[in-house]
Image (cartoon, rainbow, N blue to C red):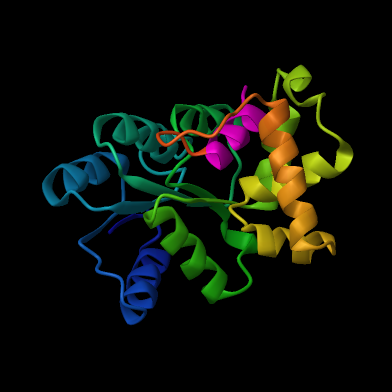
Amino acid sequence: MVIAEDSAILRDGLVQLLADRGFVITDAVADADSLWRSVERERPDVAVVDIRMPPTFTDEGLRAAIELRRHYEGLGILLFSQYIETRYAAELLADDAAGIGYLLKDRVADVSDFVEALRRVASGGTALDPEVVTQLLGASRHSDSISVLSVREKEVLSLMAEGRSNAAIALALVISEGAVEKHVANIFTKFDLPVSQSDHRRVLAVLRFLDS
């Protein structure tokens, strides 16, 4: 794993925190150029990336993440930032949401939640902060693509976008897991996503939802 974070204190803190929990940290860098060199040299399975890094502190980290995903198939990306950048974040997800996470620094209240999200991303899942999901949906231009869904189905799909399992969705919405399974099946049907051995229907459904 490589960590790209310009704040020395936070960078060192992440290295120590994750190393203590069994993660192998191959490198920790402070800018996008160093991130590129590190990924090319170390070929990590996942990168934790801040969005705003030197020299302009705007969106260097996020743009680097997009390009790295296109060059290195299977590289997991966990964006970890104080900011939500809907334009490039939607582009990152549109390429392939599998192995993508986006968490907000100020909203991570429990270290175990961060570690769980990182493991999920490393294993090819998704982990999106609810606020990120909300803003991405608000920025979407294709609202007609989700107009076929009921209010409850939209709630279920929003939680799917956060990377939650059916059991976790059932707990959050205070409904049975069987009810969640029916809603998920309805979403697949309405989005015309038949069973396929090569495609991950949950990811495809989330992409449809976040399409911009």
Front in this rendered view, residue 150 or 62: 150
How far across and down, in percent of the image, does residue 81 sit? 52, 51
Is residue 200 depicted above or below 82 in this figure?
above
Is residue 1 depicted above or below 111 in this figure?
above
Please report the residue visible at 34 percent of the width from the left and 52 percent of the height from the top.
47
Please report the residue visible at 33 percent of the width from the left and 70 percent of the height from the top.
15
How far across and down, in percent of the image, does residue 110 sit? 59, 74
Question: Per the image, is 204 magenta?
Answer: yes
Query: Of helix, strand and loop, which mostly describes the magenta segment?
Result: helix
Q: Considering the image in quadrants, where does the C terminus appear?
A: top right
Q: Considering the image in quadrants, where does the N terminus appear?
A: bottom left
Front in this rendered view, residue 94 or 139: 94
Front in this rendered view, residue 1 or 83: 1
Is residue 116 depicted above or below 32 in this figure?
below
Quarter occupied by residue 173: bottom right
Please report the residue visible at 82 percent of the width from the left and 24 percent of the height from the top.
147
The answer to whether 166 appears left or right of 146 in the picture is: left
* Residue, far left: 41
Where are the magenta residues, as a range? 201-212
